[in-house]
Image (spheres, rainbow, N blue to C red):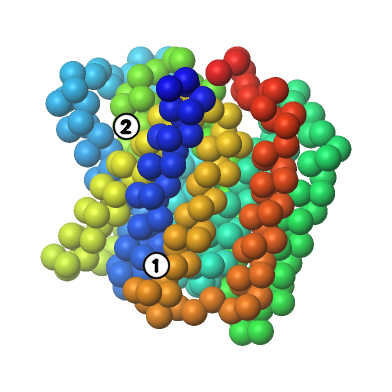
């Protein structure tokens, strides 16, 4: 198996674990979003610490590297905080669909800062994604102020996810996987601590068990496998695969929560996915899969 396919496989497996996040988060919705995000990052970093000890991987960081990891931790904290908060205000369909506009943001950011221009034939896909967002979020019959707030939070989370993905890709040769994700998760938890303490509610044993699952499944396994995949593939490909969490999340929301997506939600999701495919599966991306160096 070549490195590119290995990366796609790692991200695909990670996405399976990531798809559990919306449902598990809804099951602890009585806890503040900041507290959920804090425990997700803190417990996730603890799981990574244990795994590093089992595998004999060093995780200690040099002082000179701390400033950029503080930035990575802040971006990650904002991503999870906004994502979890969005699930409290809007539907799973809206949240996941808007969060996964991140591949478009990656295409724009890499073009601006890494001199990777967007080919003209990708503009159709970008237009389709925007159209899908309008249909999904703008023409929802039951759209409320709370849902609009949740949608805005999801878009903010998407921007942070794009930056998080680019950072993970850029640092692939500089730090071992467990060292990188441990410090990103742990520092994200530090940033989230003041938010968690603001309206802290002591988790019940049931809630704490669910928080452990959130830290283990979508974080320690899902996001860590995603970061592992980023070491072999362009973040655009990785994010494209991650969009399949939308389908899984909507299906799980329907079967476990009874949350039936509207026709507009389904139509918007379909159009967005087609647009993402058009943008990210263009043949030019096959010729330019680098972000800093060739894979």
Q: Residue furthest bottom?
A: 142
Q: Which residue is mark 1?
A: 252
Residue 60 location, quadrant: top left
Q: Residue at x 59, y 79 (%)?
A: 262
Q: Is residue 181 left or right of residue 243?
A: left
For residue 118, above or below residue 42: above
Q: Residues within 10 Å of mark 1 (few under 14, many from 20)?
A: some
Q: Secondary structure at mark 2?
A: helix
Q: Which residue is mark 2?
A: 182
Q: Is residue 180 left or right of residue 162?
A: left
The disc label shown at residue 211, or none: none
Residue 263: x percent and y percent?
A: 63, 78
Q: Is residue 207 left or right of residue 71?
A: left
Residue 198: x percent and y percent?
A: 35, 61
Query: Is residue 195 in sight in this rendering?
Result: no
Give the mark toward the camera: 2 or 1. Answer: 1
Question: In the rendered image, which quarter contains the C terminus?
Answer: top right
Residue 73 location, quadrant: top left
Residue 197: x percent and y percent?
A: 31, 57
Q: Residue at x 44, y 42 (%)?
A: 12
From mark 2 to mark 1, how far is it between C-alphas?
Answer: 29 Å
Question: In the rendered image, which quarter contains the N terminus?
Answer: top left
């Amino acid at each position: 198996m070549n490195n590119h396919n290995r990366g796609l496989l790692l991200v695909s497996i990670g996405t399976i674990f990531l798809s559990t996040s919306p449902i598990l988060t809804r099951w602890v919705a009585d806890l503040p979003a900041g507290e959920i995000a804090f425990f997700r990052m803190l417990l996730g970093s603890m799981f990574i610490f244990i795994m590093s000890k089992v595998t004999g991987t060093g995780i200690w960081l040099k002082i000179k590297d701390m400033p950029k990891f503080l930035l990575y931790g802040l971006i990650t904290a904002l991503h999870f905080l906004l994502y979890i908060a969005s699930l409290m205000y809007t539907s799973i369909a809206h949240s996941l669909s808007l969060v996964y506009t991140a591949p478009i943001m990656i295409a724009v950011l890499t073009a601006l800062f890494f001199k990777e221009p967007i080919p003209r034939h990708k503009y159709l896909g970008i237009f389709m994604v925007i159209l899908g967002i309008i249909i999904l979020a703008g023409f929802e019959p039951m759209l409320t102020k709370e849902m609009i707030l949740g949608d805005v939070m999801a878009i903010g989370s998407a921007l942070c996810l794009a930056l998080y993905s680019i950072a993970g890709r850029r640092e692939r040769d500089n730090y071992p996987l467990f060292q990188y994700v441990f410090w990103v998760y742990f520092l994200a938890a530090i940033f989230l601590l003041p938010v968690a303490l603001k309206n802290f509610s002591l988790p019940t044993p049931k809630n704490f068990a669910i928080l452990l699952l959130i830290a283990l499944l979508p974080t320690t396994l899902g996001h860590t496998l995603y970061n592992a995949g980023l070491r072999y593939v362009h973040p655009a490909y990785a994010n494209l695969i991650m969009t399949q969490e939308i389908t899984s999340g909507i299906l799980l929301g329907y079967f476990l929560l009874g949350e039936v997506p509207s026709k507009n939600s389904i139509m918007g999701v379909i159009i967005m996915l087609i647009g993402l495919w058009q943008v990210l599966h263009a043949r030019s991306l096959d010729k330019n899969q680098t972000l800093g160096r060739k894979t």
